[in-house]
Amino acid sequence: MAKILIADDAAFMRMKSASLVKELGHDVVEAEDGAQAVEMYQSEKPDAVLMDITMPNMDGMEALQAILKLDPKAKIAMVTAMGQQQVIMEAIKAGAKDFVVKPFDADRIQSALWKLVG
């Protein structure tokens, strides 16, 4: 299957996301913030990224833009809390392929991954 990079500063959310992604048969690599996500994208070459928007050091929007500079074909879905519709629209305009609203369930993650990696 695919290799999925999960970027989220909350360890619990990374663990929950990783568990769901692994259940779907994918490999997982994890990043704790946007800067680490960019580094991991370069070193691990994931097939897709699930990236939180609100993170320290470099937020998800900055990391999205940095990854797309490295790889304009990067497949990234942004993960956000309820009520951040404006940020979601900015992320889509910037090149995100999809978004997932927290709290999410397995079906929503599966749908996002299907859209990203088939």
Image: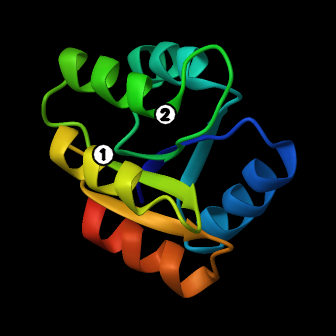
Image height of 15 relative to 65, above or below:
below
Q: Are marks 1 and 2 in contact (CB under 8 Å)?
A: yes
Q: Residues within 10 Å of mark 1 (few under 14, many from 20)?
A: many
Residue lying farthest bottom? 107
Q: Is residue 95 left or right of residue 51?
A: left
- Residue at image coords 65%, 73%: 23
Q: Is residue 39 left or right of residue 89?
A: right
Evaluate whether residue 78 shows in this view: yes
Image height of 57 relative to 10, above or below:
above
Dot 1 or dot 2, earlier in sequence: 2
Element carrying mark 1: helix
Image coordinates for residue 52, horizontal then vertical, percent:
57, 45
**Alpha carbons under labels 1 and 2: distance apart:** 9 Å
Image coordinates for residue 40, horizontal then vertical, percent:
52, 20
Q: Is residue 38 left or right of residue 23?
A: left
Q: Any mark on residue 21, and which?
A: none
Residue linked to disc 2: 60
Residue linked to disc 1: 91
- Residue at image coords 68%, 22%: 56
Q: How many marks?
A: 2
Residue lying farthest right? 12
- Residue at image coords 52%, 72%: 109
Element carrying mark 2: helix
Amino acid bearing label 2: Gly
Amino acid bearing label 1: Ala
Image coordinates for residue 54, horizontal then vertical, percent:
61, 38
Image height of 94 relative to 38, above or below:
below
- Which color scheme does this rendered protein use? rainbow
The answer to which of 60 and 20 lies nearer the viewer is 60
Question: In which quadrant is the C terminus drawn?
Answer: bottom left
